[in-house]
Image (tube, rainbow, N blue to C red):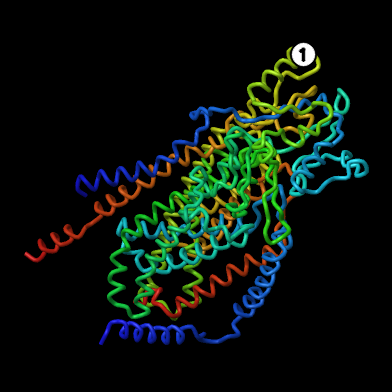
Amino acid sequence: MNNAAVFTGELRSFLKFFLQELKPRGKWLTPFNVISIPTIILGLIILYFRFTEGLGSVTNLSQQFPFGFWIGFDVMTGVALAGGAYVICFVVYVMRLEKYHCIVKVTVLNGLLAYVFYSGALVLDLGRPWHIINPIIGNSFGYNSVLFLVSWHFLLYMIVLFVEFSPTIAEWAHWEKLRKFLTGLTLGAVIIGITLSILHQSGVGAMFLMAKPKIHPLWYSEYIPLLYFVSSIFAGLSMIIFEGSISHKVFSNLIGEKTHHSHDEIVLGLAKAAAITMFVYYFFLAFIFMHGDKWKFINTPWGYWYLVEVIGFVLIPCFMFAYAVRNRRLGVIRVAAAMAIFGVVLNRQNICLIAFNWYAENRYYPSWQEIVVTLMVVFVEIWVFRWIVTRMSVFSKE
Amino acid sequence: MDRRQFFLTTATVCAGGVPANTTRAEEVKEPKEFSAVLVDTTRCIGCRSCEVACSVTHGNYVPDIKNDGALEKVRDTSEKQWTVVNRFETEKGEVFVKKQCLHCWQPACAAACLVNAMLKTKEGPVTWDGDKCMGCRFCMVSCPFDMPKFEYSGWNPKIQKCNMCYDRLLEGKKPACVESCPTDALMFGQKRELMEVARHRVYSHPDKYVHHIYGEQEAGGTGWLYLSAVPFEKIGFRTDLGTTPYPEYTREFLISVPLIEFGVPAFLLALNMLTDRKDEVQENHGWKDE
């Protein structure tokens, strides 16, 4: 028996298995499907016009606002909210806190999909996307560019997340030997992944360092990279809490009894970490505010808007987390997580769109097409997530 | 890790850091100075010949300067027109100001570009290369003068901005706008010479000019220099840009990258070893069993 024949046989049986798995399971007419399918179809139609008629045909981008909702929300915010993957990997694999082991797989999967879809949404926004390969293949390296660093780190981090998640795929495909090999790569992947995350989370912020004269001084500081990094930690933690509470309702049949019970303890632990990180973040903001002597901007509409973000969606959820951990109020934790997530969304929108060119007379508002395409990206991601968790052992069965 | 491997790793990491060292322009002495243009706004009569010459040379939209009444409002350059002349009413009467890319000494757009599509050529002009550009528009976000313009219509958009007639410069000619100027409001040369001319004019007519040459220091110095009779903020210039070359703002961050890339994994590995309680647990276990 030669090896090639064995291999083709294996491949054929896997393809058969894969096609079998590709078929949908369960009911078709769920409320989520009823909303998401038309949105995805509409989004695809909009994208057809975007790629034939140009960005201007579907977006409100202008010469003054070159970055719009697709960058400001999908990429900037999506990447921050996907920060949970590196935080949990740090906790479980580097600090060896076994308590959080049962949420590693789902968090890494969420991170992987978020990067694939949200930094993938970057391609929609590029004017000449067929040149996206240029910074990778080496015919023109812009070493001086922050974006060069960010794009490389996005790519490498996606590979790292895939390696971290790959044992689950190997398990699903019944490749036992490969699974063992891939599991052995995890610690290395985690360490590289955390390093890449520190750099690209802050790098996304560093992209705005040269936009100094355009961003309102309340939001601009030379510490933007540090702020982006710290906020990605609690954004990620809040997102795990938020997603976890939804997953435990929607996919409750996939989650084992023991994990279900330990979930409360996990949420309390994450909330504690979020409270502390948010307070550090708030302290940094206050320090930068005092150090930059920014009092003179406070009593203006921009100042009030700044306070809404910093007090309303950083300090208040921070105290809510702290209060809820002390009194074991899981409901409050969920509200605080939602507020913290909104706060990070708001911060990224402020720097990228709202307080950007704040003196401009013609403001930028996303067009409905930009919003539909963003929803499409989110929905497709949820579809893929649902497809994977219902087939692979992502949630702990214990 | 043995010694050989250690040296290899160190060498690789150091080699990785090398390209970052050549980003500071002032450390590299250019044998030839960058080309520059001096704009004397007191001489400009607002005829807009430069607009026409520019568009004809580069195949852009040619304005109907006799009838379009474009001076009525302040315009910006666009993806169709690389240069425009604006009229400002000031206490010293009408002032006309030509606007185009200023060709910074250390351009933010070129530092922003991840594929070197925006390039500071050694002749001075900042040029754009469509074979490299991926249309991310990060140059537009970074440019303090908002000069790069993007074609939002069309499937194959370009970044449009003045390239100081780079092709003409290579042929030894002046930029088209300079050649078309009937009043010598535009003067082509090297920056050092033009600075002397500009200072001389201010010196010999101290009442006629404000004592500032826009572009000498702004954003680290630009290739286009301006003289004016009225303060620059009154004729559409931003005077709050500072004198720091814009690439400097990201420099510290970029320098920290190799440090973090090398330091953090080592730190994490150390933490991972530190928290390894396998032996401890076994010991306790053994002790209990006894």
| Residue plotted at (27% across, 84% down) | A2
| Residue plotted at (51% across, 74% down) | A384
Q: Position of B209 compared to B168: left or right?
A: right
Residue A327 appears in the picture as rendered: no
- Residue A262 occupies quadrant: bottom left
Q: Which element is circle 1 on?
A: loop
Q: Amino acid at mark 1?
A: Pro
Q: Can you say whether B93 is above or below A200 in the image? A: above
Q: Position of residue B177 (x, y in %)?
A: 77, 35
Label 1 crowding class (10 Å Cα cut-off): few <14, some 14-19, many 20+?
few
| Residue plotted at (46% across, 65% down) | A112
Q: Position of residue A355 (x, y in %)?
A: 66, 46
Seen from the viewer's position, the closer of residues B258 and A83 is: B258
Disc 1: host chain: B
Q: Position of residue A341 (x, y in %)?
A: 55, 58
Q: Residue furthest front?
A: B171
Q: Position of residue B158 (x, y in %)?
A: 67, 53
Q: Residue furthest left?
A: B290
Seen from the viewer's position, the closer of residues B252 and B60 is: B60
Q: Which residue is mark 1?
A: B206
Seen from the viewer's position, the closer of residues B252 and A267 is: B252
Q: Residue furthest top?
A: B204
Q: Quadrant of the C terminus of chain B?
A: bottom left
Count of marks placed on residues:
1
- Residue B119 occupies quadrant: top right
Residue A54 appears in the picture as rendered: yes
Q: Position of A12 compared to B266: left or right?
A: right
Q: Can you say whether A59 is above or below B2 in the image? A: below
Seen from the viewer's position, the closer of residues A150 and B226 is: B226
Q: Position of B37 compared to A159: left or right?
A: right
